[in-house]
Amino acid sequence: MGFKLRFINIAFVLYVFGMAVFTPVMFVPALLIYLTAGVQASNHYIHRAGAFYARHLFSVFGIKVKLKGIENLPETNNICFVSNHQGAADIPLIVGFIPKKVGFIAKKELGRIPFLNLWMKALGCILIDRKDFRQSLKVIEKGAHQIDRGHPMVIFPEGTRSRSSGMGNFKAGAFKLLAGTHTLAIPLTIDGAFRMFEETGIITPAAICLTIHPAIDVSKLNSQEKRELPERIYQQIIKGL
């Protein structure tokens, strides 16, 4: 390992330690804002803090991020972002560069990671046990309810990281999240995130492109178009790779 990569990986360890110290400090103002100004102001603070931390992480480790299609992002928050899933960098990438407070449907194992679980709870993430079908249905229903209330959610229909530039098959169950009457589906293409860690097994400088595709108004689709929606989104995402 070269000196630069060795330095970056030592810095990563120190950064994680800093996160452990910094996270509780970040939530003190969030609580005070919630008590004095209400939930919306507190949510705005959490989004800004999370986005700052995520962007700073990419900057520190030499990760260059290009954002495309920002003009496709609507003002409404009744949104379900549907993204491919290349690597561990995907969640901080979306938190840092999508200018909305978003929650994620994420595997329950992430809820066991100290400090990360605090951020996930604050962002409105919902943890899913992929082995428990009944619990999975309840999670999907809860996510759809959050979207109806104006809290954007993100799903990774592949179910797991591809760890490459390719894409796995979509799991149809994830698209039940789009059942809300006012939901907009917005495909996201993540290109290059796997090069940050999964390709080499160590933190490595890379270039990542995040593309926001035009929104699809699910409420305007007929039954046949809704059945074809997963394939339509799949093809839209893969064009951005």
Image (cartoon, helix red, strand yellow):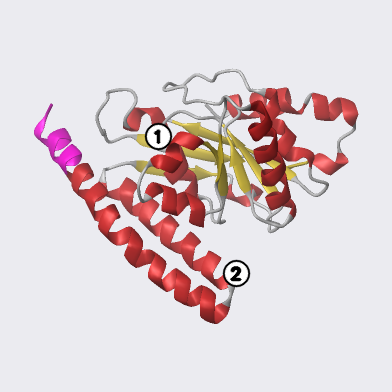
- Residue drawn at (49%, 60%) of the image: 47
Q: First in sequence: mark 2 or mark 1?
A: 2
Question: Which mark is on residue 20?
Answer: none
- Residue 58 visible, this orientation: yes
Q: Is residue 8 magenta?
A: yes
Mark 1: amino acid = Ala
Q: Residues within 10 Å of mark 2 (few under 14, many from 20)?
A: few
Q: Secondary structure at mark 2?
A: helix
201 with respect to 29 (left or right):
left
Q: Farthest residue in the left direction?
A: 3
Vertical placement of residue 74 versus 35, above or below:
above
Q: Which residues are magenta?
A: 1-10
Q: How far from the left and from the top, in percent, is residue 152? A: 64, 51
Name the residue tied to disc 1: 88
Say what secondary structure mark 1 lies in. loop
Examine the image and state in which quarter residue 227 appears: top right
Vertical side of 175 occupied by 183: above or below: below
112 drawn magenta: no
